[in-house]
Image (tube, rainbow, N blue to C red):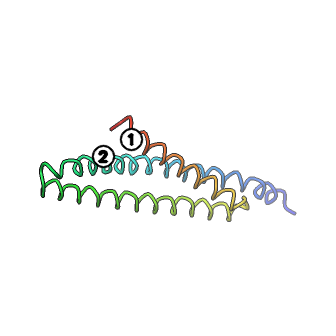
Amino acid sequence: MDPRRASAARRRPSIGVAWIIIVVVAGLVSAFYVSILLALSIDEYQRYSASIAEYGTIASLNAGEAQFGIYLGAFVLALLWVLVTGIAAAIAAGTRLPILRTVVVVGGVLVLFVGIVLVLGLTIWA
């Protein structure tokens, strides 16, 4: 066997790990912004829902708009999770890394990060 091919085969998983880290960081940055927007939409929905009795129809319409923002933010977060874990699984498959472990770690990190940002966004930053 050619020594150059043997060294390339040994280095290949480390290149895959680097690309997985790049994808995860890009996913975390995107998830941060979407999570903050989702937290703001939830806070806005709560405020308008509480004032429906006092302001009536206008508050109800604004609450409906905020509820649409909640649905859209949740959908984008789910789509982002599928995209990031799918890319990480494809990279892991191409570089002979354990696929299931990669998907569980990447997906778990993304879900944990989004949960922490949402909790902080709804309690401390709101």
Instruction: Determine whether, in the image, residue 126 is placed left or right of residue 26.
Output: left
Residue at the farthest top position:
124
**Could you say which quadrant of the image residue 101 lies in?**
bottom right
Please provide percent x and percent y for residue 58: 12, 55
Three-letter code for the amino acid on which mark 2 is drawn = Asp
- The x and y percentages for residue 119 are 44, 42
Residue drawn at the location 13% of the way across and 48% of the way down: 54
The picture places residue 89, in percent across and down from the top left corner, at 62, 62
In the rendered image, the quadrant that contains the N terminus is bottom right
Label 2–label 1 contact, CB within 8 A: yes
For residue 12, what is the image quadrant? bottom right
Kindly identify the amino acid type of the residue bearing the numbered disc 1. Gly
Give whichever of 98, 20 is nearer the camera: 98
Q: For label 1, count other residues whose C-alpha is less than 10 Å away and answer few (under 14), some (14-19) or many (20+).
A: some
Task: Indicate the position of residue 39 as horizontal and vertical percent values.
Answer: 36, 47
Q: Look at 53% across and 51% down and name the residue there.
A: 110
The local secondary structure at tag 2 comes to helix
Q: Is residue 31 above or below residue 68?
A: above
Q: In this image, 81 relative to 98: left or right?
A: left
Q: Which residue is mark 1?
A: 121
**To which residue does mark 2 refer?**
43
Q: Residues within 10 Å of mark 2 (few under 14, many from 20)?
A: some
Q: CA distance from mark 2 to mark 1?
A: 9 Å
Q: Residue furthest right?
A: 1
Residue 53 or 120: which is nearer the viewer?
53
The secondary element bearing badge 1 is classed as helix
Pick whichever of labels 2 and 1 is earlier in the sequence.
2
Q: Nearer the viewer, mark 2 or mark 1?
A: 2
Image quarter hosting the C terminus: top left
